[in-house]
Image (spheres, helix red, strand yellow):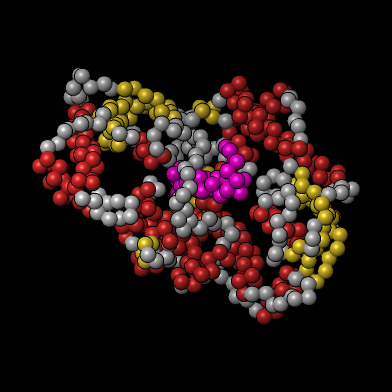
Amino acid sequence: MITWMQRHRKYLVITIWISTIAFIGAGFVGWGQYDYGDKAGAVAKVGKITITQEELQKNYSNLFNQYNQMFQGKLDEKKAKEFGLQRQALKNLIDQSLILNLAASYQLRISDAELFDLIKTQKAFTKNGQFDKQQYTDTLKQNHLTIKDYETSMRRELLIQKTLYLFSPRVSPLEGTSIAYAMGVADKIDYKVLTPDMLTITSDETALKGYWEKNKNNYKKAATYDLSLVRQPLLSTNPNEADINSYYQSNMHSFTSNDGKMLELAQARAQVIAALNDEATQKEALRRYIDFKKGSLNSSVTVEKINLSSDSKTFSPELLKEIMALNTQKAFLKPRKVNNEYVIIKFEKLNPTMPKTYEEAKAEANIGYTYEMKKAKLQELAQNSFKTFHGTVSDFITRKESSKLAGLSDQESTEFVNKLFASKQKQGFLTLESGNVILYNVLEQKLLQDTTIADDNTVMKLKGNLLNQKLLKMLESKYPIEIYAEGI
């Protein structure tokens, strides 16, 4: 079953981002803090499945990077907010959770063998065409992932696929023929792209303040943490030759060249000394940690007082996650390496999210206000001009082979053509996910001579999309959805 799903998985579900190696090569992107009410640490709950802040941050990061590729690296947080990527990230996780609830009701599981069958096929984990355990470990480590977290994520994805497979459609010859004719229709169109950037919105203080009043819960100060921090700088131990040789003999396999060959002691000497210094520094940091925890820290050691926000870039996302998990019962964090030193952190106080005043939120609210105004005016412009416009005339285009249209990205071209062929109107306008609006007029239509029966995958995708939409609607009525995060 898993082999079949791997071969056909792109046809199984349209609402779920399959993260085969979801985080490899993707930078971490985050945004501000939510108000969690009494459900600290969770942003939503679907049936028995809790959606955590970490899951939402990761899903948003993946979504941001996919859109950023579409915009050739020019996507920023402002545009991401305009496009509603935060809402889409949460919607993705809610859809996944609905299906996971269904899987639990069927008592479906993913075996270790099924999981390994997927992992061993990933190119990032192979060396010379074969799965390599060390490559697997190193690749995850380089991307700040633990094996446990990665395999938990993959097991979840496979479970979703397995569940959806129970509802996978079957294709009849008549359906194949019908779809083939639909796919064989080609249109020549006159079209024009309208973008929000074409419009200028005049500043209106009264209207902006009214918008803020209606949406003030969306604009809050991030939660902050009062912390005490003790640093342990890197030590220089000046190890003797016996210590250097002993450490090298015990750890020689850790010292390799770029091509994977083990280095001789003479070549690895600087690395061995650095490792010994790091080991000594970590031991001293552990001593300070114990003293700090007991309240017997030497008076010569400086204890820094810092205030850290939940969207801070001071530490890595992984360390920030650990800090945010601290509380009065578990106040201390063991030494963590940051750059070339170790830090010991103690939780002192949580300062929860607070609503921003109008003046504090004004600049941010103006982004949302401007977007909503442009969106409304763009729709008004499209409504008033789609019957009289003159734009660019395309070649004949089909649903199956939508060549890139001038002024649109490949993804926008595909989205537009799919919506065009689903429309019954000869003239009109279509709104894309990017916010752009396309005016169109079908000038000519023809049936291609080389129309053949559509392949099963094409029909399966169309049927699967409809089935998945209906399935999710049914599950929404079956499993209660509670959303704790405000401002999304």
Q: Give the residue at x 65% y 79%.
A: 172
Q: Give the residue at x 77% y 49%.
A: 438
Give the left or right position of residue 77, taking residue 390 as reference.
Answer: left
223 or 229: which is nearer to us?
Answer: 229
Q: Quadrant of residue 209?
A: top right
Q: Residue 61 in magenta? A: yes
Figure disc tally? 0
Furthest toward the top, the residue is 299
Q: Is residue 110 above or below residue 302?
A: below
Give the left or right position of residue 468, taking residue 340 as reference.
Answer: right
Q: Which residues are magenta?
A: 50-77
Q: Quadrant of residue 352?
A: top left
Furthest toward the bottom, the residue is 173
Q: Is residue 59 above or below residue 226?
A: below
Q: Position of residue 263 (x, y in %)?
A: 24, 51
Give the left or right position of residue 88, taking residue 195 as reference.
Answer: left
Q: Quadrant of the C terminus?
A: top right
Q: Is residue 394 above or below residue 267?
A: below
Q: Give the residue at x 12% y 37%.
A: 240
Q: Is residue 11 above or below residue 226?
A: below
Can residue 425 be seen in the rendering of this structure? no
Q: Position of residue 361 (x, y in %)?
A: 59, 26
Q: Give the residue at x 62% y 39%.
A: 79
Furthest toward the right, the residue is 388
Q: Residue 55 in magenta? A: yes
219 or 367: which is nearer to us?
Answer: 367
Can residue 218 be seen in the rendering of this structure? yes
Q: Position of residue 100 (x, y in %)?
A: 47, 59
What main secondary structure does the magenta stretch of the protein show? helix
Q: Position of residue 328 (x, y in %)?
A: 31, 31
Furthest toward the front, the residue is 266
